[in-house]
Amino acid sequence: MSEAEVTRDGLRGERPGREAPVGVQGPRRRRRRRGEQSMVPDAEFTSYYGRPIIKEPTWSALDIAGYLFLGGLAGASSVLAAGAAATGRTRLARAGKVGALAAISLSTVALVHDLGRPERFTHMLRVFKPTSPMSVGSWTLAVYAPAAGVAAVTDVTGWFPRIGRAATGWAALTGPVVAAYTAVLVADTAVPAWHDAHRELPFLFVGSAATAAAGLGLLAAPRDETGPARAVAAYGTALELIAADRMERRLGMIAEPYATGRSGRLMRAGKALTIAGAVTAVALAGRSRAAAALSGAALLAGSACTRFGVFEAGLASARDPKYTVVPQRRRLDGQASRDGQASRDDQASRDDQVPLDGRAPREGRTP
């Protein structure tokens, strides 16, 4: 029983060394003593009957992954076509314009097919919400697709050249948004492999779109006009590889779906095809029409494999509950550790301001 008494003059009879310091964390007890065997196994992660924590997206791989690939191909092709037209490479410019029109048309068909009814796409144009990637993407498609169509038709027919040049410039300005916004669209979800990769996915998608557009130009344009396509192939390949490497290093455990299973095989195939196509384009496509065609086909196939690989990786991460719960627990543990350290630092700073005799410092007196 304590012998301390509370009087008008303060606490009397207290035993020294019994005060409980406020805000100071005591030493943590060890969970088990040396040589002692625990009878209860360590807790491991599990979910309710092993069921997923989040709902797996119900998107069709052919529709949505194809939409991701074709949209990137269309946007980058418009940029390449504008550059080719400005430098007098008419065949390469026509290939880019026609390819952009075909790709954006097929991507819109794939999107509408996944939505189920065509009017659902037009309903998304009722409002413009800058904070919604779907709203921004819908409006981007609405202003890009007509320009891409006018640019292609006027180039093939020769009608209204001024209107055609204006449409080509507008499609080139909005093309990068078409190529990149789909990365923001999939990253703005709860799917771990997509959401946690929100920093690198736009660069990965832009690089993949650039290689696809370069591949189309190498396939369709004559050999003496493929100079810009070869340069874009090298640039796109470098950007895609750097973004993929940084993504895998930063994500840690979340990057496992990009390296395992069906998605891992698609990502490796995309990387191999892209590197082979870029090397062939830079080294041989300028001297051989057959090499240009082979490199173009490899670049297109590599871009498609990358987009389908990213799509499948997202589905795989949604099916496995560990990719949802384990990172959340790590973030919570890290936040708790930072909060505890901040509390201890704050307490130490307050202790440094109090003198040893317990009295408040007077003016001009240092503790």
Image (spheres, rainbow, N blue to C red):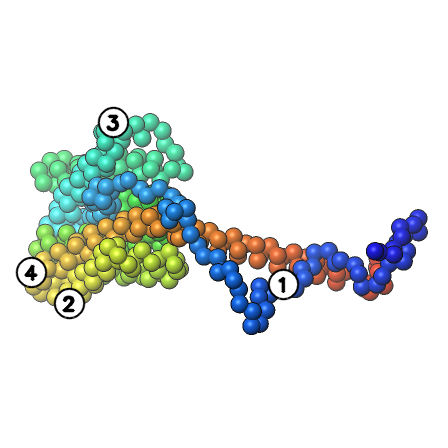
Q: CA distance from mark 2 to mark 1?
A: 63 Å
Q: Residues within 10 Å of mark 1 (few under 14, many from 20)?
A: few
* Vertical arrangement, residue 283 with respect to residue 321, above or below: below
Q: Position of residue 332 (x, y in %)?
A: 52, 52
Name which of mark 1 and mark 3 comes first in the sequence. Answer: 1
Q: Which residue is disc 3 drawn over?
A: 119
Q: Amino acid at mark 4?
A: Arg
Foreground label between 1 and 4:
1
Foreground label between 2 and 1:
1
Name which of mark 2 and mark 1 comes first in the sequence. Answer: 1
Q: CA distance from mark 1 to mark 4?
A: 72 Å
**Residue 146 seen anywhere in this rendered image of the structure:** no
Q: CA distance from mark 1 to mark 3?
A: 62 Å
| 199 displayed left or right of 366 | left
Q: Residue 110: which quarter of the image? A: top left
Residue at x 61% of width, y 57% of height: 340
Q: Position of residue 127 (x, y in %)?
A: 36, 29
Q: CA distance from mark 3 to mark 2?
A: 48 Å
Nearest the viewer among 332 and 278 is 332
Q: Secondary structure at mark 2?
A: helix
Q: Which residue is disc 1 drawn over?
A: 28
Nearest the viewer among 187 and 101 is 187
Q: Which residue is disc 4 drawn over?
A: 289
Marks 1 & 4, CB-CB < 8 Å contact: no
Name which of mark 4 and mark 2 comes first in the sequence. Answer: 2
| 254 displayed left or right of 86 | right
Marks 1 & 3, CB-CB < 8 Å contact: no
